[in-house]
Amino acid sequence: MTVDIFDSISPLDYRYSRTEIVRKLSKYLSENAKVKYQAMVECAAAKVLEKESLCPKAAAEEICAACQKISASEVYEEEEKTKHDIRALANCIRNRVSEAAKPFVHFGLTSYDVVNTADALRYKECAEAVIIPALLELEKTLISIARNEKNTLQIGRTHGQHAEPITFGFALAEYVDRIGNRIIELKKSADGLRGKISGAVGAYNSLSLFFGDPEEFEKEVLNELGLKPALHSKQIVEPEFVLDFLHHIVSCFGILANLSDDMRHLQRSEIAEVSEAFGEAQVGSSTMPHKRNPVSFENVKSLWKSTMPRLMTVYMDQISEHQRDLTNSASSRFIPEILAAFAITIERMNKTMAKLAVDKAGMARNFDKSKDAIIAEPLYLLLAFYSHPDAHEAVRKLSSESNLLELAEKNFPAYFKKFTPKQVDILKNPQKYTGLSEKKTEDVCSSWEKKLGIK
Amino acid sequence: MTVDIFDSISPLDYRYSRTEIVRKLSKYLSENAKVKYQAMVECAAAKVLEKESLCPKAAAEEICAACQKISASEVYEEEEKTKHDIRALANCIRNRVSEAAKPFVHFGLTSYDVVNTADALRYKECAEAVIIPALLELEKTLISIARNEKNTLQIGRTHGQHAEPITFGFALAEYVDRIGNRIIELKKSADGLRGKISGAVGAYNSLSLFFGDPEEFEKEVLNELGLKPALHSKQIVEPEFVLDFLHHIVSCFGILANLSDDMRHLQRSEIAEVSEAFGEAQVGSSTMPHKRNPVSFENVKSLWKSTMPRLMTVYMDQISEHQRDLTNSASSRFIPEILAAFAITIERMNKTMAKLAVDKAGMARNFDKSKDAIIAEPLYLLLAFYSHPDAHEAVRKLSSESNLLELAEKNFPAYFKKFTPKQVDILKNPQKYTGLSEKKTEDVCSSWEKKLGIK
Amino acid sequence: MTVDIFDSISPLDYRYSRTEIVRKLSKYLSENAKVKYQAMVECAAAKVLEKESLCPKAAAEEICAACQKISASEVYEEEEKTKHDIRALANCIRNRVSEAAKPFVHFGLTSYDVVNTADALRYKECAEAVIIPALLELEKTLISIARNEKNTLQIGRTHGQHAEPITFGFALAEYVDRIGNRIIELKKSADGLRGKISGAVGAYNSLSLFFGDPEEFEKEVLNELGLKPALHSKQIVEPEFVLDFLHHIVSCFGILANLSDDMRHLQRSEIAEVSEAFGEAQVGSSTMPHKRNPVSFENVKSLWKSTMPRLMTVYMDQISEHQRDLTNSASSRFIPEILAAFAITIERMNKTMAKLAVDKAGMARNFDKSKDAIIAEPLYLLLAFYSHPDAHEAVRKLSSESNLLELAEKNFPAYFKKFTPKQVDILKNPQKYTGLSEKKTEDVCSSWEKKLGIK
Amino acid sequence: MTVDIFDSISPLDYRYSRTEIVRKLSKYLSENAKVKYQAMVECAAAKVLEKESLCPKAAAEEICAACQKISASEVYEEEEKTKHDIRALANCIRNRVSEAAKPFVHFGLTSYDVVNTADALRYKECAEAVIIPALLELEKTLISIARNEKNTLQIGRTHGQHAEPITFGFALAEYVDRIGNRIIELKKSADGLRGKISGAVGAYNSLSLFFGDPEEFEKEVLNELGLKPALHSKQIVEPEFVLDFLHHIVSCFGILANLSDDMRHLQRSEIAEVSEAFGEAQVGSSTMPHKRNPVSFENVKSLWKSTMPRLMTVYMDQISEHQRDLTNSASSRFIPEILAAFAITIERMNKTMAKLAVDKAGMARNFDKSKDAIIAEPLYLLLAFYSHPDAHEAVRKLSSESNLLELAEKNFPAYFKKFTPKQVDILKNPQKYTGLSEKKTEDVCSSWEKKLGIK
């Protein structure tokens, strides 16, 4: 059934769907994809029935062949009649096989054996094939910039105020580390997604009619698909597997939002340390022709705001009464939107960072404004270390004046004599007061290249 | 640009889009609709330019004619080049008019003059043309059932426990009142939506170059569209107007979720006081052929869980730095999803309630189980009123036994003599202990019919 | 029962409780306050019983006298036994009155008649006595600064980028308008809070045993307290009254968060247009003696982040099964925290804004950086108005160069001849390109002074 | 500073603080506890300074002795002057030591080295000493009931409708498994909490003045406390460590909410399969003396609703601009409330479940109502297996009649002949149709006893 894409209501469908990454995602997250995965579960069950000699080989083959041909369109048409999506799917498969094969279609399965297993599989494969690779690309981009800029002096900022100097590479190493950490956790929780073939209330009631060991049947069907069962399920798989997975996605999204805020602010007119690349013909404002706006970074933040609260739905959906109520059914249909919004954002962030213009001169200019003031910290610490009884207060009082170093030398000559040459050097050259910025940048980058195997 | 609907990612597009109400909503909420409304703003501006003699009549007419032909498809193609949606729209209009008219296209407007005004208008019209009428239909349905059942005895439940008797009509009158109240508030806040024609930072900078009274220009353009300006705007309209509107929508959605929970539980196998109508060919379960499930009520609850947390995005979007940052841009594109999910839910709720099977015998059966116990309350109150010093405790002790009334008559003969005949009648016929259930039901229904003009 | 305040777990109790405004709030929001208000409801009911000749005058007087003496401490002790808070309250009152008065204590009331009514009353009075006056103070402070700075040139910022000029007063007028609007709405919804005296399931079951017109009894009791009944209630008052009230509080909180973000960023080292006043002995950093941090603005934003999501609890609490389940009981106990956090924030914002240091020279310095570029907009518009066929594009191309005006005069001499003197004046003096900034500031301030009666 | 506990605003302080578990939590979560932990960090730093020969042994001893005496009360008094909490703490320590030791107090540390490290430590210890043990107790209770009831027939429910039979033990095994899983994850993330001693911007700027290897210094200080550093930190530790920890807490809370909903509904008057134990003198309702309400289960659900949305604050606090803004400072102070609410809930849930009255007769009674209907599933499957071409539809049509089995035998005699004796046995004795309920219950219980070492 074809429609005008602009008759869609969701921006994921009418607007973001034409990005390259969404085309990749479609194989896992569209409704067509869902039906395809559900049919894969039906086929896997038929195969194992055959392996267990419960169904003739020809029947299993027929069923699997039929499963490959099923389209969402056909299932939806059938659902008009049955008012039940999985019964519609089963009917569609049955309609495509011989009378002999019909009884083995959906045999022993309950709807959510199919729905939950298919969802676990497509989310897992989507993470492994699209999301994690995209994150690894972003990680590589960030590592590359961090390394290039590991010596690029930048004033560190706390409270939006100039604090102590770092390097721009060190600032980015924060994100290399945080995102690296999320990739590891996301891999784990994608791999931790679980399927089920345990029947309508999870107790293998019907399967027990036919199988000596229905748990073995479950294991084999899931194994066909590359999944494992949970230790316990009811009509549905325990919700925490998907919740953990989405928590890692949304918490990684938050890191991108943080990076995007940092970049937005570094791009402020007065700060101007970085900027998004800007197309030759791109328009900044419909009315202010001179504008160069951080639109990609704003987009990242905005999609985060749009997506993050949806996790609350998943926390609410942890509650399903008794062996299951169905109040998580419609809401679960929206989970692919979270994955899609996240993947779109990773891709956009990666493209934007890859072309980020870093203005070293701008960073130097901003640093220079504070180079006098920032020696307040090393000065107070050196005074304290060499036994000034109230160094913090003494320096705080001087620090409202300019010429802090000069004043300090005049006020505390005895202390200055005790300072080592390296210490004096830092007081005179505050640009050297970057601590371990360079080393740490390199350590973080190398460590993650190794852990993630992306060198 | 046509696509397979099942390649969509949002259930609003692939699944719920084929309901009747979504077809109505599409005129306001789809991307095509958005572009259409934005073009309406451009046309309105041209008309007022002409009225103010700043633009030739022919030019304004050309522009408005062009505006009517603009499609989202065309604008998106142009946006590929400009990377700016409203500049793309303006270019598309310009491409359709003569050289003489070109300068007056988008004249004096900034992007968000168009975006915010168009959104205010389409949300307002969507509420007035679709959402509020649908709520009024639901209200009528509920009033009709409430009236029919105003004498239908039902045991009232608190904590899921039998409490005091009411009537089923009285229980529904709660929803008549709550939804009625929301309709009034929603009307107000839809009417309260505001547009703006105040330029890039809200100070009418550019308009002041050409207009003696740019506020008058703003008023006239908005008036063309049936809108009013806010007292102050910056690049964007103050976000509280849309937030209030969505608060009323989401808080009304919560009421539907509550009603749906009530109905779900009344449909429990053990309670069985109501049931959703069930199609002849409808399948309850893919594996349990005997099931009759409250799927519509579950769907309502589920869509509420999916929608409600999205309001948090709107609360976050109240924050826009200085004269505006753009981190609310992508997120605002998702607002139509909230309206669509709500409208779909109203329609489904209305259809489901309209066919609700009310099992009076089931209600009577459940009442009967507790008819002895429920006289505990009137008994304790009557004892207390006629001066028993510790009536609550005295009755609490007796109430673990059956035959409460008999025991009480034996224990407190002196008190029973003081009771009025009406009081004794209620103790002996607890089904009469429904207080004002009937009167209140009628009062609530009549009151809302009058206030909403739906009789 | 006294405790060490620092054994508390909530920062509202151990940290923010010592601000002046929390001491005022305590009368409405502490547990002592809650019990006091609940006792007020019990007293009001006794008074009306007497008025209706159902209870002797002496008894009503005894009860009201007892109500005034009840402390939370006493009620909690009794609750240890009864495991029921309102029964405990009733017992405490009973213990303080004669045998003759005992039967009329809590007569005809159900727990939530007392709880909901007391909460409605204390929230309403808290809003009227503390929160709204505090907001009015803040509004006055903002009006005063806005007026003082209505001519103070500032560069307007969109996307964090310099856009068109405004005045600082105009920027603040945004907040005057938004907060003014919230004050009006908050007043309405505080006044809209409703009580109930309608019994255990809302049908006046028990009251009907004794009163010819139990709705009249409800009205009179509530009237004693300055409240009105809802048209319908069940065991509890419809939740939307409190939800609307809290929505207005939280949406006003969001405005304070926005203002605080604006001020934080204007205080950035590179921007430096405003700063929080800083105490002589105040320490900016435990280790960097030179820091001047926007700690109050950060605190406002942080308390908003902490408070806003709690509104989701209230949206969830709209759902209460049948005539009521009790899953909103514990959660409702946390509502006063929302009010307290908001009130604390208003007070802190007001104090901070009242002492805000506005650096006009800093604003001028930042404006100067962009004064050339910002004429791009008026230039493009004037060219367009005087019939340049593609003015936006033409100016966009020039705008990457400096000397935009000079270049433009050279490139478009024919157009410049058509410009009016006022138009040329603005192109040459971009500081005059502030549109209606001054007028709008004054209009907004005057309008709200009048509407709020705060002149 | 002592206060009346009922002047508190937070229910955590005035109401829940008197539970046994909160008294335990107080050692970790109160403001006194926080200051104590912060002083522990200061002491650990002094010890390592001494170990590194940067500070005399006597000085380190003096500092640690002083640290043990510091109270929150004293620090708050000092903060009145400094307006900075950690500087106040340092001053308080300094005031208690000799001039010689003063310089080594807080030497080389920045505030958040202390704050973040102290918080990581107290949250970790709170989890290990209180929360996880409480969860293990609950797990043991649930295992014990599940085992006892592993053969207790119960009708499984989906959509609130009778589905297929299970055992009550099997239903509880779901929670054993889900909670067991959370305990494992919570242990990991508690152990994963990280500290930092890396200075004001995370680059060890000041420490580099004095230490050859400042990362070694960091490691040693944290090692003194039983913590590890993150690979990278800025002014603050990366927020994902605490976020993961709280995610596991909140997601475990959701499981308790689900269990509580199940129990609430099983306690409904019409279902009556379980009930909360009820104290002899306990009052169910202030006005309905006969009520027995599931108040503990309602309380659990309510505290979950109150707590869960607060996680959104933590997701928002992932964003901290540049090397840190302070907008997560006040909000972080509320994190202990999440831990406290959760711990209170575990304890209450455990006590309630431990005394749960399980009504086997009630379960049998409910099962009996559906015993005819539930054979629809096995019947349809057996027909299908033995080659009925449209078994689901055939049975669906019969299932609206009573006497399903009889009808089926009459309609499908040929099929019945093919059924095995075990299959016929189940059709005639649907109470045997519980599948693997018993085995699975035992497997889940044994598996978790082993994994958690709680046998």
Image: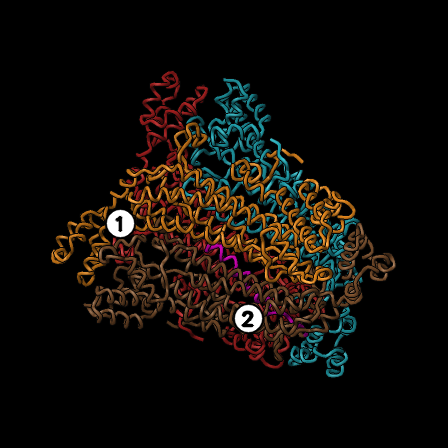
Chain colours: A orange, B cyan, C red, D brown
Indicate the amino acid at tag 2. Glu
Res. B124 in view: no
Which quadrant would residue C324 be assigned to in this image?
bottom right
Front one among C316 and B190: C316
- Name above or below for residue D28 compared with residue B216: below
Res. B222 in view: yes
Position of residue B279 measured from the top left corner of the image (x, y, whole percent): 78, 49
Front one among C365 and D188: D188
Which quadrant would residue B413 be assigned to in this image?
bottom right
Q: CA distance from mark 1 to mark 2?
A: 52 Å
Q: Main secondary structure of the magenta part?
A: helix
Helix, strand or loop at label 1? It is loop
Query: Image check: B19 left or right of D217?
Result: right
Indicate the amino acid at tag 1. Thr
Quadrant (top left, top right, bottom left, bottom right) of the C terminus of chain A: top left
Check if residue D291 falls in the magenta segment. Answer: yes
- Name above or below for residue D150 compared with residue B282: below
Position of residue D54 measured from the top left corner of the image (x, y, whole percent): 21, 64
Q: Label 1: chain? A: A
Check if residue A170 falls in the magenta segment. Answer: no
Front one among D382 and B55: D382
Residue annotated with mark 2: D449
Q: Residue A434: which disc?
A: 1
Q: Residue A85: which disc?
A: none
Query: Image check: A137 left or right of D450?
Result: left
Q: What is the magenta range?
A: D290-314
